[in-house]
Image (cartoon, rainbow, N blue to C red):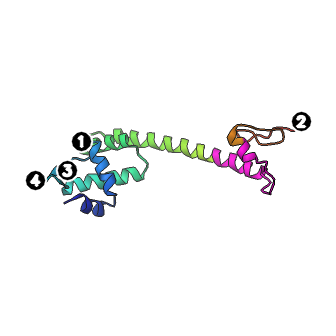
Amino acid sequence: MNVGVAARRTGLPAKTIRYYEEIGLVAPERAANGYRDYSSEDLHRLAFLRRARSLGFSIEDCRHLMALYGDKGRASHDVRALAKGHVVAIEHKVHALQSMRATLEKLIDACHGDSRPDCPILDDIAGEPRPGRIAAGGTVQPAS
């Protein structure tokens, strides 16, 4: 089947499928006319990649997961270790996002939101905390 049909069946954009081919995650056969000819095994690999990517695994993690999936002699602890490492990375991202949210909430609270031109949000982004304003990291600089 061609890339359009493969895209419809897997829920992936054709551009993504071509990219996965370019980086060696899938290798469809070529028909006599040179067009890609995706097999049911290729579709299975693409669906596997779609699911792994939806869980946030990197391309390299997906490559590793696919190798483990294809290795019937694999040890499940290898897969578990990869998944646990990914959870740790997700936890770090969650913490970073919570910190960003807290900083932005402090900056928003410090902003008058009126017609005046001074803006603690822009000052912070520019790295120009002024007395009485919120500084980088969400701390208030005392007025002198």
Q: State the SS at label 2.
A: loop
**Hey, what amino acid is under mark 4?**
Ala
- The residue tagged 1 is 71
Q: Nearer the viewer, residue 61 or 5?
A: 5
Residue at mark 4 to residue at mark 3: CA–CA distance = 13 Å
Count residues near mark 2 (Cα–Cα under 10 Å), then give few for <14, some for 14-19, many for 20+.
few
Q: Nearer the viewer, residue 23 or 83?
A: 23
Residue at mark 2 to residue at mark 3: CA–CA distance = 69 Å
Q: Which residues are magenta?
A: 99-123
Count residues near mark 1 (Cα–Cα under 10 Å), then give few for <14, some for 14-19, many for 20+.
few
N-terminal label among 1 and 3: 3
Q: State the SS at label 4.
A: loop
Q: Main secondary structure of the magenta part?
A: helix
Q: State the SS at label 3.
A: loop
- The residue tagged 4 is 32
Seen at 36% across and 54% down, the residue is 51
N-terminal label among 2 and 3: 3
Seen at 47% across and 44% down, the residue is 87
Residue at mark 4 to residue at mark 2: CA–CA distance = 78 Å
- The residue tagged 2 is 144
Which numbered mark, 2 or 1, is in the foreground of this view?
Answer: 2
Q: Are marks 2 and 3 in contact (CB under 8 Å)?
A: no
N-terminal label among 4 and 2: 4
- State left or right for residue 5 relative to residue 139: left
Spot occupied by residue 52 in the image (x, y as percentages of width and height):
37, 50
**Hey, what amino acid is under mark 3?**
Pro
Q: Are marks 4 and 1 in contact (CB under 8 Å)?
A: no
Residue ranking furthest to the right:
144
Q: Nearer the viewer, residue 72 or 8?
A: 8
Which numbered mark, 4 or 2, is in the foreground of this view?
Answer: 4
